[in-house]
Image (tube, rainbow, N blue to C red):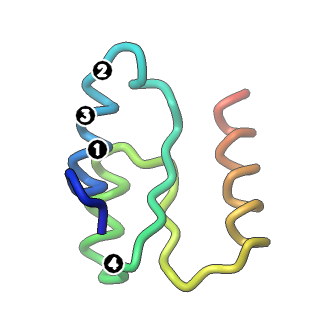
């Protein structure tokens, strides 16, 4: 858990700021319930990775998000 605000609050803040609204975000979290995944994506996260994860999975997902951003 993040110390000052939740990841969901951070996504909302980033999406409301014109300087950061187009930056793709990936949520990396221990929250694994379907409702958490759906809510994170609905708030604007480009992807949602549940712990535990492998470094290879993280790199693959980052690559896909960046490729989507550049098309």
Q: How many angstroms separate mark 2 from mark 4 (CA)? A: 25 Å
Q: Does residue 21 lie above or below 54 as drawn?
A: above
- With respect to residue 3, does 13 lie above or below? above
Q: Are marks 1 and 2 in contact (CB under 8 Å)?
A: no
Give the vertical position of 14 relative to 60 (above or below). above
For label 1, the residue is 10
Image marks 1 and 4: residues in contact by CB distance under 8 Å: no
Q: Are marks 2 and 3 in contact (CB under 8 Å)?
A: yes
Q: Marks 1 and 2, Cα distance to the nearest angstrom?
A: 11 Å
Label whose residue precedes the other's in the sequence (1 or 2): 1
Kindly identify the residue that appears in the image at 26 percent across and 53 percent down. 8
Q: Earlier in the sequence, mark 2 or mark 4?
A: 2
Q: Position of residue 42 (x, y in %)?
A: 30, 51
The Cα–Cα distance between marks 3 and 1, rounded to whole angstroms, is: 5 Å
Q: Residue 36: name its quadrant.
A: bottom left
Q: Could you say which quadrant of the image residue 34 lies in?
A: bottom left
User: Can you tell which mark lies on residue 13?
Assistant: 3
Quickly name the residue at label 4. Answer: 31
- Total number of numbered labels? 4
Is residue 2 shown above or below 49? above
Q: Earlier in the sequence, mark 3 or mark 4?
A: 3
Q: Secondary structure at mark 1?
A: helix
- The residue wearing badge 2 is 17
Residue at 32% across, 30% down: 15
Callout 3: helix, strand or loop?
A: helix
Crowding around mark 1 (Cα neighbors within 10 Å: few <14, some 14 to 19, many 20+) is some
Q: CA distance from mark 2 to mark 3?
A: 6 Å
Quadrant in which the C terminus is drawn: top right
Tag 2 secondary structure: loop
Q: Position of residue 12 (x, y in %)?
A: 24, 39
* Residue at 30% from the left image edge and 61% from the top image edge: 2
Residue 23 appears at what percent x and percent y? 51, 30
């Amino acid at each position: 858990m993040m110390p000052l605000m939740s990841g969901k609050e951070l996504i909302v803040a980033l999406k409301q700021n014109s300087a950061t609204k187009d930056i793709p975000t990936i949520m990396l979290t221990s929250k694994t319930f379907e409702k958490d995944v759906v809510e994170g994506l609905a708030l604007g996260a480009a992807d949602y990775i549940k712990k535990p994860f492998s470094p290879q999975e993280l790199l693959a997902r980052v690559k896909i998000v960046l490729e989507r951003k550049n098309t």
